[in-house]
Image (cartoon, grey):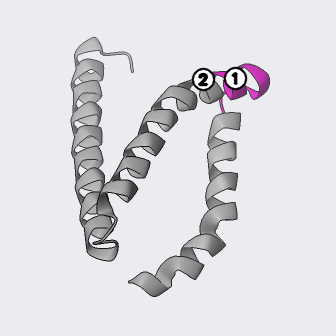
Amino acid sequence: MHNLYIFVILSFAAQILGGIGAGLNSTCAMAIITALFQEQKELYIGILEAGIGIGLLIGPLMGAFLYSVGGYLLPFWTVAAICIALYPLLLHTNRFI
């Protein structure tokens, strides 16, 4: 971006869209946990929140480490590999839906 004003506007738009997506994701996750695990929903919501907190702590650290080791593309390739590796788990747990 060579134009500062367009860069700032696009940065704000990206942050707004990311916030909306995070809010929708959190709401859906809570609804799914509440629907599937009615007897122990507090336990599973606590596990979800703990996982989110740990991810927010470790994610930037791991991203910075991967960037320093392999450059700009390594964090993206790592996330892609993790998603591909976890895809069979998603297919296996599809029985809840």
Q: How far from the left and from the top, in percent, is residue 7? A: 30, 21
Looking at this view, name the residue that lies furthest to the front.
39
Q: Amino acid at mark 1?
A: Phe
Q: How far from the left and from the top, in percent, is residue 41? A: 31, 62
Q: Amino acid at mark 2?
A: Leu
- Residue 31 left/right relative to 67: left
- Residue 28 left/right relative to 56: left
Q: Quadrant of residue 28?
A: bottom left
Binning the other alpha carbons within 10 Å of mark 2 as few (below 14), some (14 to 19) or many (20 upward) gives: few
Binning the other alpha carbons within 10 Å of mark 1 as few (below 14), some (14 to 19) or many (20 upward) gives: some
Looking at this view, name the residue that lies furthest to the bottom.
95
The residue positioned 27% from the left and 59% from the top of the image is 30
- Residue 44 left/right relative to 51: left
* Residue corresponding to mark 2: 61
The residue positioned 61% from the left and 69% from the top of the image is 87
Q: Is residue 72 above or below residue 51?
A: above
Magenta span of residues: 64-73
* Residue corresponding to mark 1: 65
| Residue 71 is inside the magenta segment | yes
Q: How far from the left and from the top, in percent, is residue 96? A: 42, 83
Q: Is residue 88 above or below residue 59?
A: below
Where's the N terminus, which quadrant?
A: top left
The answer to whether mark 2 and mark 1 are in CB contact below 8 A is yes
Q: Quadrant of residue 32?
A: bottom left
Q: How far from the left and from the top, in percent, is residue 18? A: 30, 40
Q: Main secondary structure of the magenta part?
A: helix
SS class, disc 2: helix
SS class, disc 1: helix
Looking at this view, name the residue that lies furthest to the right.
69
